[in-house]
Image (spheres, grey):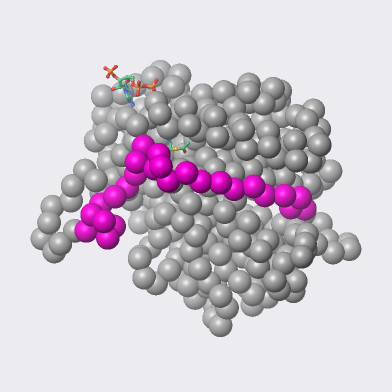
């Protein structure tokens, strides 16, 4: 069964507060030059006013629904990608549905770290193949700041908070948006320990009265993550192009996971992708994990970087490890 899907609407939302590199100079032993040279990041939006995953998903979803010309009550399934939900129970998808005033639908969270959007998109495709009338709301969000140790200069400068959302249905005559031509996703748990947040999970539980330990926050071997990210993202994007008999010259826009500029440049070089085709917004948002790709896609469409007719290649990589690629035609 193959029902082709279309992204009918996109939206994004970030917290109001911004942390600049100058702010980090006051917090840890770092400087703007180190951060910009190593990562390209200049500032990131952070939920300092208490915004939650569901708050940001709600903001992004309202935009996506408006762009799709739909009401929340039209939605049949809610799929939400995050590693930082408001609570373990209920799921963020259930909370988002309630916030949108809908109930009686399947609502579930997907955990694939920075690859969450593509994992959720593949889930949406499967749901639409089973239920061709489905109207899936896909939200992807991380409040990475809730699990970042702001005394660890090696990780705290890299991340920001944000959300992206998309409304996806089966394709049909007269519909406009981004046709989902294909999605490829993959994983390898063998190297998962290179990027973890273990504390508070059932493998590393906290008891009442325990002090919060280092394992509550993101722990990462940056150099190894860098190597795996470049290799995996490039190879899955190559696989996507080969599978469709395409080359980079057929691609109009490449939207990679906005981890950092050096990873983006290295992947671009391996794919032989001209810089002018690569969309980045990590300079102002940092690495927003699951939100990274939809936040970039939503902005790229809003800014006219993605135009009607554009062939868009997506690439992602994240904790797990998980990685993936998507091919869209606007
Ligand atoms: N400011 C100043 N110095 C710093 C900082 C900082 N913020 N952070 C680390 N350093 C220091 C280190 O302590 C080290 O000092 P030492 O040599 O005295 O020990 C030195 O800088 C070099 O550290 P490295 O970790 O070797 O620096 P590297 O050049 O590898 O860059 C970085 C670090 C940017 C984290 C890089 O490894 C990277 O991009 N990794 C990918 C990580 C990533 O993007 N993870 C996100 C999650 S996964 C994903 O989304 C793809």
From this view, report whether residue 73 is shown above or below residue 203: below
Give the residue at the far bottom of this rendering: 104
**Visible residue check, residue 189:** yes
Closer to the camera, 10 or 133?
A: 133
* Res. 200 image quadrant: bottom left
At 12% from the left and 56% from the top, the residue drawn is 210
At 47% from the left and 44% from the top, the residue drawn is 188
From this view, report whether residue 6 is shown above or below residue 144: below
Q: Is residue 314 magenta?
A: no
Image position, residue 169 (x, y; %): 73, 65
* Res. 156 image quadrant: top left
The residue range painted magenta reads: 178-205
At 54% from the left and 81% from the top, the residue drawn is 103
Image position, residue 147 (x, y; %): 32, 48
49 left or right, relative to 56 = left
41 left or right, relative to 19 = right
Image position, residue 86 (x, y; %): 38, 63
Image quarter hosting the N terminus: bottom right
- For ligand 1, which image quadrant applies? top left
């Amino acid at each position: 069964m193959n029902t082709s899907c279309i992204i009918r609407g996109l939206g994004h939302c970030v917290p109001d507060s911004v942390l600049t590199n100058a702010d980090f100079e006051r917090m840890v032993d770092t400087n703007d030059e180190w951060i910009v040279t190593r990562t390209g990041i200049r500032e990131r939006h952070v939920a300092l006013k208490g915004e939650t995953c569901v708050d940001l998903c709600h903001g992004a979803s309202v935009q996506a629904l408006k762009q799709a010309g739909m009401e929340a009550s039209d939605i049949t399934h809610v799929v939400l990608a995050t590693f930082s939900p408001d609570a373990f129970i209920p799921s963020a998808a259930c909370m988002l549905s309630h916030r949108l005033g809908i109930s009686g639908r399947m609502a579930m969270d997907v955990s694939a770290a920075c690859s969450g959007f593509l994992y959720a998109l593949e889930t949406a495709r499967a749901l639409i193949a089973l239920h061709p009338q489905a109207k899936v709301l896909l939200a992807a969000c991380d409040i990475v700041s809730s699990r970042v140790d702001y005394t660890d200069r090696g990780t705290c400068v890299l991340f920001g908070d944000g959300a992206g959302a998309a409304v996806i249905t089966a394709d049909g005559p007269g519909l406009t948006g981004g046709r989902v031509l294909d999605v490829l996703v993959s994983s390898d748990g063998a190297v998962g320990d290179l990027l973890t947040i273990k504390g508070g999970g059932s493998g590393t539980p906290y008891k009442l009265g325990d002090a919060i330990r280092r394992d509550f926050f993101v722990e990462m071997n940056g150099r190894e993550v860098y190597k795996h990210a470049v290799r995996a993202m490039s190879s899955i994007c190559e696989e996507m192009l080969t599978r469709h008999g395409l080359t980079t010259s057929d691609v109009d826009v490449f939207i990679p996971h906005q981890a950092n500029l050096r990873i983006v440049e290295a992947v671009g070089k391996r794919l032989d992708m001209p810089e002018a085709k690569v969309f980045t917004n990590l300079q102002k948002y940092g690495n927003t994990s699951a939100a990274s790709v939809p936040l970039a896609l939503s902005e790229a469409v809003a800014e006219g970087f993605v135009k009607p007719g554009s062939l868009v290649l997506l690439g992602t990589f994240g904790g797990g490890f998980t990685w993936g690629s998507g091919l869209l035609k606007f």
